Structure formats: C-alpha cells, structure tokens
Amino acid sequence: MIPEGTVPALVPDHLFTWLDVEQHLAALAERGSWPFWLVEVNSYWESVRLLTDGSTSDDEVWAWLSHTFGPLTIDQDRQVLLLDQSSIERLLPVEILSTGGSTADHRMPRWKDHSITASLGSPIAPPTEGLPAGIAVCAFHSFKGGVGRTLHCLAVAKHLSETGNRVLLIDGDLEAPGITWMVDSQGLRMDYAYEDFLALTHGSLDDDYSEALELGAKFLANQQIGGVVVMPARRIQTLTSPPRIEPVDLLTADRDPYVLTSVLARLAEQVKANIVLVDLRAGISELSAPLLLDPRVHRVFTSTISDQSVRGTAQILSEIARRAPARDDDPDISVLLTQYSEPDHRSRLEEVATLLRQHALEASSGQTPQEGDSTQAVDSDARNPLMASRFDPRLLNLPASWDDVLEVIEAADIVVPLRPLTDALGRVKARPPAVADSGQEDDTEPDTVRQTLAVTAASLQYADTSTDQEFLVTNALDNLIEAHRTDPPIEVVIGNKGSGKTFTFLQLCTRGTWQAFADAAGVQEVSVMSRTAPVFWSTNLTTERADELVALRDSAARSLTGGEAAVPSALKTVIEEALASERSHDELFWRRTWLSCFAKAIGLAADVDTAEEALTRFARDSNVIFAVDGLEDLFPLFNTSRSQSTALRALLTGCTEWLRSLRGRPIGLVVFIRHDLARSAIVQNFPQFESRYRNYALRWNRTEALRLAAWVCQRGGALREDSAWVKEANVDQLSAVMLRIWGERMGSEKSREARSQQWFYAALSDFTGQIQARDIATFIADAADKSVGDRRWHDRVLTPNAMRNALPSCSENKIYEIGQENEPVKALLEKMRNLHSEDRKVPFTLDVVGLSLSEAQLLEFNGILFREEDQYWIPEIFRHGLRFRTAGRPKVLAIANLVRRRNDSA
C-alpha cells in the first residue's frame, strides 16, 4: 500500500496510447521513483506487463498504479488503465506477473531501452576492458545536420595523417552519407563498406569476428588516400532504400554490449591504423547510439550557436551524462562550435560556450555542475577547451570530390581550432627535416653545375632516353598503387601528351612485378606478386628500350605458361587484320581480339574465338598484369575511323569489365591512353568514364610541378638534398630549396621583378592550370644550358634571362605536341601563327585574328585562350610559339592570377 500522506506522483497530462504509459514509467525509473518490488515493465500496444519479485500482493501493485497514474486512470476490477477517451472508452489491459526474484539487467548502449527497469536511473554498465592495442576511437556527432560536422571530421583526419598517424575514417551516416559521395566522386575503390562490416559482424558465429576482420583488412588496404583508410557507408550509391542493417542489430544478449567499438578498434589494428574516426548520423538516432554511449570513445559534438542546435546538443549531453558518463580513464567529451563571426556573435558565443562546457563536464565526469562553483568552472575550461570554428563562405558551396573538398578545408584552415582534439588523439611525427646545411660553402663552379643539370634534365624529357632508375611518385601513381595492394589493377591511366604516360609504363614493366613496382614507388604492404607483361608500346621508343620490353615479355611468358610470347609484329598483325575484318564495328569481336593479344603475349595458344576460354583456364591458378601503351600508333585515325574508335572502346570498357568478372581479379590490366583518344572512343557518358578513372589521371598540380622541378634539379646535382627528402618535403620546404635554383625574384632580391616560383607556374601552365611534366624538364634543360657563362648571378643556378629565353623553345615543343594529338586545335594554332605580324598581339579581339566564337571556345576549353570582357589572352607557354607580341611588358603573373581566381570561383 502507499503510505498515508504521501504526495501523489506527478501524473501525466494525457495517456493517448501505450507509448505514453511507457514513457511515464520510464521517467519514474530515471528519477528513482520505483518501489523495491517492481522488477521490470514491458509495454505493448495490447497491454502493459508488470513483473514483480513476488514480495507484494496485487492489491499493493494496484495501489501504486493509482498513486502513479491517478485514481481516475485505473480500474482494478477490470484490470485496465483508462486511456484518454474518444467517442468510445479506450482501455489498456494490465498484467501482473511474478518472477520469483530479480532478473538480469540486459540494458544496451542504445537510446530506446527494450524494457523499463529501475536501472534506468543509473548509467549503463560500462565496458570492462579498454580498447585493444591502444587504438583511439573518435565519433563526430551533431544534433542537427548542416553544422559542419563532416568537414571538421575530414579536417581532423587530414591533419592526423599528415603528422604521422594512420587513420581509419568511417562514414557512419547510413541514411545521408557525405564522405561516401566524396570518395565516390574521387574514384576511390569502395569494395568494403560500413554496411558490409556490420553485416559480417552481425552474422559471425564466434567471438573472433574473423570474417569481418580478414575481409576488411584485405579490401580496406585498397581504399586509402594518403594515410587515411576510408570505409564508406555503403558500396552502391544508387540505392535509395533505408539501411538494411544498423549498428543496434549487433546488440544481442549473447554479445558484449560494446561489440561495435571493440571490433572497429580490432579492424583498425588489422589495417595498421592507430586512430578510428567515425562521422555519425545527425540527430537522436540509433545509428549513433552504440558509439556515443561507449565512454571509451572520444565524443565530439558539433553545433552552431543557433538556439535549436544548442538546446538539442545540451539535451544529448545530459542524456549521455545520465546513461554513459566518462570515467577517470576515459576521454573527455568535446564540443565544437561552428559558423559564428566576429565580433557580431562574440557575446552569444561566450554564452553558448559556457552552457555547453557545463554539460560536457557533466557528461565527462558524471557530476552535475553547481552554480557558482568556480573550481568546476576551471576544470571545465581545462578538460573541455573551447573549440570554435569561424564562419567561412567557402564552406557553403563544396565541390564533389575528396581532393577538391580537402583543398577548400585547407584554404579555410579549419583544423586550427581543433588542435586540442588532434593533440589528444594522435602522435606527432616531425615533418621532413629542414634543408640540410653542411656548414660549408659549395665551391663547385656554377657553370659545371649548370652543364650537368642541362644534360640530366634533357635526358628526362623523353621516357626512352632516360636511364634514371628512380622516378617521382605523383598523387595519381600513389593512388593507383594504394588502391591495389591486395589485388591486381584493372585501370585506365589517362593523360595528355608529355604528362608521363610512357615513362610510367616503362617503370611498371621494367620492374617485373607489381610488388617490385610498388616498392620502387615507396608504397609498402603490397601483397600482389603478379608478373607484368607488356603487350603494346610506343613505336617511338629506341631499339634498346623496345628490345628490353620484348625480353621482359618473353621472360614472363616462360615463367607463367612455359610458352613462347608472340613477337611484336605478330600482335600488330592481329590488330591490322581485325581492322580490315567485316566485323570491325563489332565491340564483342574487338573485345575477344584484345583478349587474344593478351593471351598470345604470355604464350597461350589462342585466337579470337578461344581467347576467353584460354584466359579463364589460366586464371584458375595463375595471375598476371597486362600493360598497354602506344595506342596512338596502332590507331592513327581514331578521330575519323569508326572501326578504330570501336576497337579503343572495346579495350577501355569491354575488356576491363570482362576481366573484372573473373572472381578475385587474377588478371590485371593497366591501359595508358591519351585523353583525346579516350574521349573519341567513349562517345556516350565520357564524363562518367573519366570520373571513374580520375584518381589515376596524370594531371600535374602546382605542388607536384614544384616537386618535379626540385627532383629534376636533385637528379642533376644542383641540389644537395637526397631524392627521398625531395619526395617527402612539404611545399614550404620545396620553395626554400628552389631559391638556390632560381632565386627569390626574376632579378635581384630587392628588385620589383616577379617572384621566381610564381613566374615558373605562370609561364609553364595553360589557362586550365595544367603543367606537363615534359615541359618542366625541357624548361630546366634549356634554362640551365642558357645560364652557362653568365657570371652575374652567383646566388642561383638558373639566371633570370636564361629562364625567360628558355620559354620560346618550350613553347615551340608545346605547340608541336598538342598539334599531334588534336587536329582541330592544330589547325587553329597554325592559322594564328600565320597571321600578319601586325595582328599577332595580345590582348586581341576575335575579329582581328579571324576566329569564330565556337573556335575561340574550343581553344578556351584546351587552356589556350582566356577571355576577359571582349579581349583574349594567350598563356606564355603558347604565346611564344605562336609569335604573338604583348602590348607593353608581358603581364605574366597578373593574367595568371586573374585566370586562377576565375577558375577557383567557377
């Protein structure tokens, strides 16, 4: 019975359904207002069941219900609760059952408890063990979407990877993924996703979860960008259905309630990551509960200073303080405030920071802050330092791909306020050391250095003339290898003429195996041992290089099949006969023709009709990677011949898809192709095709161009730093060492001339911002040669006059090469070059040079023209070769900066 004089319980205003009954009973449990005899309550739509320990009578239970819900809400005679009436009486039956004692508490880390027990007033039983191998798990959450949660999570991942940490980054938002779309646009492989991990863990029959871990380690090895291993939310982005499996599905009675965090940490250990970052679903969702209610997790709550976002965040922090507060050895709760501006929001920011700091301290310690307690205020400041990220308009309109988003993040520098978090999560690894200084002056004669550099740089202009066994690993090459650590590549490498396709092809082939190629590129933990078999290559290679490739292919054939590889002329005959065939417009015929060439290249006896069967038999217990280059020599009429474009399309799409259909991908293929050939072959959906292979496209950005220039100078003996240093140095360090090559300015240090590095970018890039590798080598070779004998500049290797005078020859080469790969552009350039000298001036209008608007747009697309109002400009790398003069002094940097700003805002 309820003692006389007891104050009635706070009864609910309405009881519409069983959900209101359940909510009221749960609130009582949370306040500790349950009688000792009540063990558990379970509410359903048809009844509410009360489990007692058997120590009390049914009358006492009904008396407590009357006190709890109000006397007019219960009807003991009919054994029901009276719900709010409509036109009819609405009843909820009550069942009272005795358990004969207490029951085990099976509360799980989730927001919605399946059963209501007295333990709701206490925290959930915490984990009994720490995370394995010292792995740090950090989860980013927000009450509302659109507050910058994902961007700041990415900023942390980027910073940690750059400071010597290896990060496993997980897109845990299964309903509205963000990171997943970025890596999909980037072209990163997505063979293993968070959904896969959850399904494999859920279906595991043992405590080792070996399938989830082994498959994860195998495929995640190919899903890396730099030091970040990315696990997308799901593999197939076109699915619009809700998630098929959720984290809470793992919470079964026979498992550790914190299985999700523990197995994620073990997976990180498998992929050699020391930090796990998870971008969670916004809102109060069971998708986020298992991680947010694990006190071992670094929990980061992101909010703007708007009232709704603040109140929602405070509510979640209060719930965590009640359910899963951090213990002494657990990480503290962090709060990140975003999208404020100074000084407009200063007072509001301080107000919000104080409020959320208090809630964060409560969740970090389980202690409720007391008003006026200065000690706790100091503790809050120390344990939960304010992380506040200012509003930046660049973050409002984000690009699609991973790389482009990271560029915006870097420009906005949003990682700075996150340093307390990154310091707590990661270990710090020093950047490559500053430029080594022996303390002695280099007394080598400048002309000796210049002559050696000129010879070395000239040898690096063309792949077949270079004898250097080292090569510079670009982002594209690094991406290609890192995406194929555990299985052979089946990829297309697209690049313009002079971008390094043939050089990379030769490096791949001459290393013999994929693993050896990866080792030479400095990529570790590659398990693919497949031999490389060159099939076709450029006819412009020297006889020595061509003979070397033949020998490599013969060796691969003997090793793989014991047969004799077909000679180059025989394979070329296969292509020529196919072009002459009446089936030359049939893509299936061409796919089988290509496969027959592959088979013959490794000594398999196969023709067009038997190649697929022969390669399938071979693939059952063997593996190989085929490499193809020199397609412009095989198909010179690709732009006008239907059969030649069909042949290329079959290679780029038909062959790659057939090879991917072989389970386990035992046969790899890397096709090196010029951009114009690929665009001509893929008539429909070329942007989609290009996007698929974008991650491996040979495009030199400004950082890579600077690194290549430094590497060429290092190989030529003009820099003392070793090759490894050049490959790892950051932009600032590269800029510093290049001062010894070209000085601070294109004149004396105190002159008003352009800065040499900016001039280099502006002079060699087109108006799309692209710089070709061959142009860099050609420029350095010519500038070094022209610097010989100039005694006026002792502080640099390349003199200003020599650099300026090297541009014309570079420009001539550039125009010749673009003409080789693009006939329409070649015709327009010849037209402009043949203009009367009085008309060859920049800037110009279209009527002066006789170009139509469509012709000008074609040249703009290729980076050769830039329109500013009604006038057009030509980049320096083309202007000299076209023999155009400038009105006054050339505005190289001014126009380059204008173009760059225009491109950035496009």
Image (cartoon, helix red, strand yellow):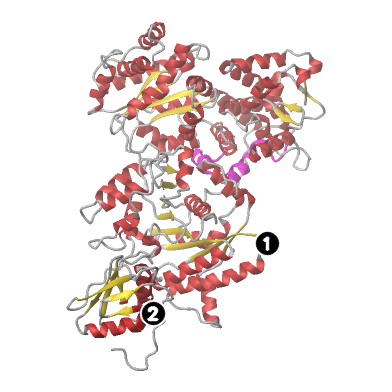
At mark 2, the secondary structure is: loop
In reply to whether residue 730 is colored magenta, the answer given is yes
Specify the quadrant of the image occupied by residue 894: top right
Left/right placement of residue 32 relative to residue 379 reads left
Direction left: furthest residue: 100
Q: Is residue 409 above or below residue 96?
A: above
Magenta region, main secondary structure: helix
Query: On residue 872, which mark appears?
Result: none
| Three-letter code for the amino acid on which mark 1 is drawn | Glu
Q: Is residue 761 above or below residue 819?
A: below
Query: In front: 741, or 27?
Result: 27
- Dot 2 alpha-carbon crowd within 10 angstroms: few under 14, some 14 to 19, many 20 or more: few
Residue 240, position as x, y percentages in the image? 41, 43
Residue position marked by numbered label 2 in the rendering:
31
Residue 773, position as x, y percentages in the image? 56, 28
Residue position marked by numbered label 1 in the rendering:
342
Query: In front: 98, or 132?
Result: 98
Direction bottom: furthest residue: 4
Q: Is residue 554 above or below residue 165?
A: above
- Dot 1 alpha-carbon crowd within 10 angstroms: few under 14, some 14 to 19, many 20 or more: few
Query: In front: 152, or 627?
Result: 152
The reply to whether residue 467 is visible in this rendering is no
Earlier sequence position, callout 1 versus callout 2:
2
In reply to whether residue 330 is colored magenta, the answer given is no
Residue sitting at 51 percent across and 55 percent down? 145
Specify the quadrant of the image occupied by residue 94: bottom left
Region rendered in magenta: 718-745
